[in-house]
Image (cartoon, rainbow, N blue to C red):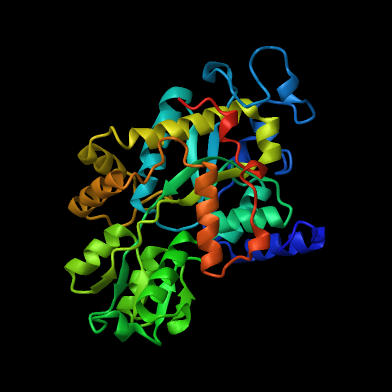
Amino acid sequence: MRKSESLSDMDRIIHVGMLNSNTQGRRRFLKAAGVGTVVGLAGCTGTNGDDDTADDDDGNGTADGSTDDSDAELPDTIGIGTPSPVQPLYYFSVFPEFQELMEDRHGVTVELTNYGGYASMIAGLFQEEVHIAPQAPLSVINSLNEGMDLVSPLSFVQGYPQPLMATPEIESWEDLEGETIALHDPQAGTTFSVKLMVRENLGSMDAVDYDYIFGSDSRYAAIEAGEVVAATVSATLGARAERDGFTILEEGLERDEPFQLWTMMRQNWEQNPELYDVIVNTLHEAQTNMYEVDEDDIVDRALDIPVDRPESYGDLDREIAIDVFERMRNLNTWPEEGGLSNAAIEQVQDTIVDVEEMDEEDRVNRDDFVIIDEFDLE
């Protein structure tokens, strides 16, 4: 996919993404603005969409997006997208940590919108349904090559391994040959990890079939129902599966590269630098806080989130959650320095090319979309 493709092609991709999205229960954060989505972000932040905010000389906004948080005019609600109906534990940095920081400091509500995978979440960003969303690197690359002007200020998750769970009858990799593995999304980093593991253990990535089911809980249920014999699941569900007698073929590859990047539309950032400065700096602070918080406290705070809210973690086992959270800290799951170095971007593209999900000619340059240097991350 190249940048020269027509606008109609890009519209088609956005339309397909919207059709694939999980629209049940989705809520718009723009409802308080009383305006259409095209101008929604500017309207709800108190800025004039026709003004060049970066050129203001009142000392509040700057071209690089930096600002004093106390001067920023914020909307009532910050919208964040997610590609999965139930969040893995690495979302602790968002709910409850980021959520509580925004509410305590600014009186702002943080609202999660669930999408059925990365393609529909890209469409959600384009439609301005959410301010910011974590995207898989391949999703970002494909979008850039389609002409969508996404930018990434921060990495969300790096090196996060998902266990490969199987039915008790699958005792070894050889038993899995010719069977079907359920994965989350064709563009997800865990998909590439599984394909690398399949090639290493069975000689070819084509030794198994692949199916895609959104959400670890749904894939777990598919194994229980006999619909598939193996699937990637979250670390907490993997621990539960092992306890309940299922096979864990692999704990997952610990790849030291970005798995998800925080992304937003460039135009929205440029029109609302003060808003995005607060969002990005607070997200970074929340991720850094994951190495300081007490594991019992963060798990208890997460368990206090009602399970019927979209930012819930499902039916968590408290002791398993504490063990998994400690493991994620030891793996440096949340990048403390932003995680978007040129080496990291090149490494993840090497992996995508290696698993034959992207051609060499489709690589992107870090400077085309990474804007971490525009923020004064503390």
Q: Residue 76: give x, y in percent of width and height.
A: 55, 31
- 24 or 78, nearer to the observer: 78
Q: Residue 122: give x, y in percent of width and height.
A: 62, 54
Q: Is residue 228 left or right of residue 303?
A: right
Quadrant for the N terminus in the image: bottom right
Residue drawn at (53%, 20%), measured in percent from left and top? Answer: 69
Q: Residue 335: give x, y in percent of width and height.
A: 41, 40
Using the rendered image of the protein, determine whether residue 96 is visible from the camera's viewpoint.
Answer: yes
Residue drawn at (34%, 83%), measured in percent from left and top? Answer: 176
- 19 or 346, nearer to the observer: 346
- In the displayed structure, 285 sits above or below 168; it is above
- Number of labels in the image equals 0
Residue drawn at (49%, 51%), measured in percent from left and top? Answer: 260
- 173 or 297, nearer to the observer: 173
Q: Is residue 351 left or right of residue 48?
A: left
Quadrant for the C terminus in the image: top left
Q: Residue 139: give x, y in percent of width and height.
A: 59, 57
- In the displayed structure, 57 sits above or below 110; it is above
